[in-house]
Image (tube, coloured by chain):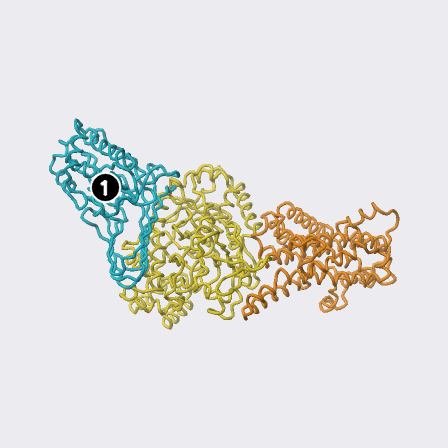
Chain colours: A orange, B cyan, C yellow
Amino acid sequence: MLSRVANTLYWMLRYVERADNMARLIDVNEQLLLDWERLDSERLRDFWMPIVWSAGDDSLYSELYGSGHSADVIRFLTDDRRNPNSIVSCLFQARENARTVRDQLSDELWEELNSLYLFLNSSEAERMLRDDPPKYYGLIRRSVFTFQGIASSTIDRGLGWDFMDLGRHLERADKTTRFLDISTFLPPSAPMAMHWNAIVKSCGAMGAYRALHAGMVEPRKVCELLIFSRTFPRSVRYCMSRVQQSLHAISGSLMGDYSDDAERITGRVMGQLNYGVVDEFLKEGLHEALDGLQTQFNTIGEEVFESYVLMPHVIATTHPSKQSTTTMRAWQYQQEQEQQ
Amino acid sequence: MIGTKLQVTHSTVFEYAAPVVDSFNTLRLEPRTFPFQKTISSTIRIIPTTRVRRFSDLFQNITHHFEILHPHQRLEVQSRLRVHNLPLVIPERSMEATKDDLNDPSTRERTWPFLQDSNLVSHHSQIWRLAIDLSHGMTTLHEQAMVFMNWIHQNFHYQPGATMANTRLEQAFEIRAGVCQDFTHMMVALCRAVKLPARYASGYIYNGPTDLLVGAQASHAWCEVYLPFVGWIGYDPTNATMADERYVKVAVGRDYDDVAPVKGAYRGTSHCSMSVKVLVEKVEG
Amino acid sequence: MNTLFDGYTPWAGYDEMFESDGSVRSCCQSLKNVFDGLSQKEFEERKAASDLYFLRQGITFNVYHDEKGTERIFPFDPVPRVLTAAEWEHLEAGLTQRIVALNLFLHDIYHEQHILNDGTIPRMYVDEAKNYRAAFRGMDVPKDIYIHICGSDLVRGADGQFYVLEDNGRCPSGASYLLENRNALKRAFPALFETSDVRPLDSYPRELLNMLRYISPVREGDPVCVLLTPGCHNSAYFEHCYLAREMGIPIVEGRDLVVVDHFVFMRTTKGLQRVDVIYRRIDDDFIDPVVFRKDSMLGVPGLMSAYRAGNVALANAVGTGVADDKVMYTFVPKMIQYYLGQDPILPNVETYLASEKQDLGYILDHLPELVVKAANESGGYGMLMGPSASKKEIEDFRAKLIEDPRNYIAQPVVSLSQSPTWTGEEMSGRHVDLRPYIIYGEDVKIVPGGLTRVALTKGSLVVNSSQGGGSKDTWVLRS
């Protein structure tokens, strides 16, 4: 498989996953607001800003909106094309990626993503976002589910699939840690129980939580489920074990061994998650522990790019001329563009 | 649609061990329109490129002529043609025609060249004897042609490599073997021995998806006999069949010498290898 | 019941569907019967369904010089254009003859140049042609074929005859629209195909792949063929993906390829893989920044060295642009006579060369009646339509003609044939042309039909998609 194609498939899934998570997060939090008693602008900001902080987009936000109020935050996260991580930006980017590897996708898969793109570009979408936001987010999420369903029933389980699955789960693991991290940024005055409720819902984990635990939602139990569960499909551990499977399927190396740094670091993270316990995490400080995981996820992403897309060793050993620098530059351009 | 449409791709490549010069060539690759066959299209590609001139020869065959004077080590001639063939229908009275029907002046004039000796087919006493014996007691021209055709098919052995392009009839007759060219020369000679006008036809056969007929991967040849009231009708001694709508006729003449598809001369090395590729396909529409 | 064709007036010139006396042409009768059985509402619903199919499939093109960069669908008209078996046979013979002659011409001018040496074509027209790549003279290309894929634009005049308007021998596009038009029409109006014996088109990708394999410089094993695209911002990107997928070959961008020791490789997740044949959809100018435009990020550095070494085949070859120069077009009938010894089967449109003194005088005197075209532009750009041009446009062109005569030709306005087209309210005649796609490999293959482009504005003669043109399905009947 062409390196560029592998890279594009990987990013396409990351973008779709990112959009889906953001849509769920906003939807859940808007619902939550309805239960809140006093809705002055100050409190609303306190409510929304942690989401921006946890996504790491706060400097772009203040550049675009200054302090702003809650409607701006929602706009910024939903359909502001200037924010590369907004839902609409992510989906446009995913569709653009799909377009460049159209020949690798089934017609149905392309049609689904393209239809969603056409909808988001329409005046109907704008109206719906204004008048009936739950319907808007619901529609996006349903379309993403359809996309995932079509993908799993039409894409050949070869290399392409491995790269897609890798992208999907790495992004999902990352998003779960970021949702948990929202709690770090909440002002001390915030009603914590309600927020933890929202975090669990944002990960689509309320059903799973209820099946395990009765009573109030407790932070410790939430962390245990969302980080250490072996079976819940959005837990960090589950996602990372899928990442590990994909990486080994791609390289062909044995589990327990590693052929590049992506595999090595994934293995190390898996050790931490397989044999760690939630109390150690909380002792270290939840934010610090989550931050540590995110840094490792980033490194895994970079190493995958290094091994399969750039492949410096192949070019370096066979062709040390200046032509490779030209192409290197082209690759870097691609990378910058996609990680906007 | 009535009939069959056939497409032929025929390429000939000469490769010389050293550069040659002053190459002069004549091609007979483009068919004119015959009573049962219409040419839809025909193109000839020659590499190295050169100016090509086109004219009709003595027998109304379309002929291309070209020269390549500068040194070259390879010469490729590629012909593509499409024809539309009508089913072969011979009227009853032509089938019944006898030698007497050849006697009117215009027929005599038209057929005269095809009763004489030619370069590769000349009078041969044993063949003459054989022709008389075989046709003994037969009255119609068609019957005689059929008996000659079948005799050759049964008694000659199809053996590529046994003869060459310039092999004379006597040699092939001696060994009772050869390829379509020799089979055809033999039949022409038998016919002429009993004053049956006969000519040499060159072209191709479509042999369907399976290789049933011999002579499909090269250009083919068969014999044509003049039947009064209808004209020249083909008999293929190599396959013992009438030349019907599966046959693509390109050129006609007294013998191979008159119709050689690619013929030429050049100055230079004698080390020349030739490869020929022929593909005949049915066309839709 | 009212039918869709009620009130339709055939054009005074050649109408593709109706005879001059208003009766329907026999080849279109069964097709008209099907449309006659539909109410306007049914028809419009089905047409809307076909439009949606194009949009959903992303069968769109990007318009250059349009800052919004919006994707548009290529408007599709559901009334097919019909060619009889006999008409098609004639076109096929003419196009075959033409592509063989054009290829022989290219071989000649990149080798011995007989046709120039003996003055049949004046030497300066080749030497000064913008797309003549003198550096490639003397180089042999695989199987001696230069133009492997040719899209020739044909028009039918008022006399019912087909004329060749131009040959596109560089990177002709549009073949995917031809295939998708058929798919869309089959989905929206299946009944049309039940009553007519239409020849299918689906062999195109297969023939294309056969051709690519045939020209591979590697003699053994399965050659690795790829399609080289400028990327997803190119206006024909959809087509590139479509064809690559139909052929089952990788679609690559310049940055996916790398040249090592005069061999071309593609970067895959398992390392470098050798490439034998490149179906390139990038113009010469951008294909190798080492040899051509230095600023091109689309191409592959060093590709030309591999090409020269005979280690990779390109379709089409480098330097074919000289043959679709509109000045060279004038000489195609001479090429046919010269290399094939035959008369041209399909005539050219009468053409005046601004570089010839006498012709220039005529052109300048008759500008309001003529179409003036720049020799090396395509897509309807750089063109003057005399009869509909403003005074100022005419004067602008006059100045250009005097300044750079070599770069212009002029032709009388051909009154293109018309075909009934749905305007949104009624059936009305619109001018159409025809672009068949010719594949030249081991054999010459022409997919039956071609892309019929239609000028959607009443009376307009410009059919280019970038200038408000649409397209139709083209039928070739079996008998």
Which quadrant of the rendered structure holds the C terminus of chain A? bottom right
Q: Dot 1 corresponds to which residue?
A: B172
Q: Nearer the viewer, residue C31 or C24?
A: C31
Compared with C298, B32 (above or below) is above
| Image position, residue A326 (x, y; %) | 56, 69
Q: Is residue B121 left or right of residue C182?
A: left
Q: Residues within 10 Å of mark 1 (few under 14, many from 20)?
A: many
Q: Quadrant of residue B93?
A: top left
> Which quarter of the rendered picture does the N terminus of chain A lie within?
bottom right
Q: Nearer the viewer, residue C193 or A234?
A: A234
- Residue B123 falls left or right of residue C401: left
Q: Is residue C293 visible?
A: yes
Q: Position of residue A87 (x, y in %)?
A: 69, 57
Q: Amino acid at mark 1?
A: Ala
| Quadrant housing residue B194 | top left
Q: Secondary structure at mark 1?
A: helix
Kindly identify which chain the residue marked by label 1 belongs to. B
Q: Residue placed farthest to the top in the image? A: B137
Residue A124 visible from this viewpoint: no
**Left or right for B140, reference C266:** left
Between A181 and C47, the residue placed more toward the observer is A181
In the rendered structure, the answer to whether residue C213 lies left or right of residue B71 reads right
Spot the residue most to the left.
B105
Q: Position of residue C126 (x, y in %)?
A: 35, 67
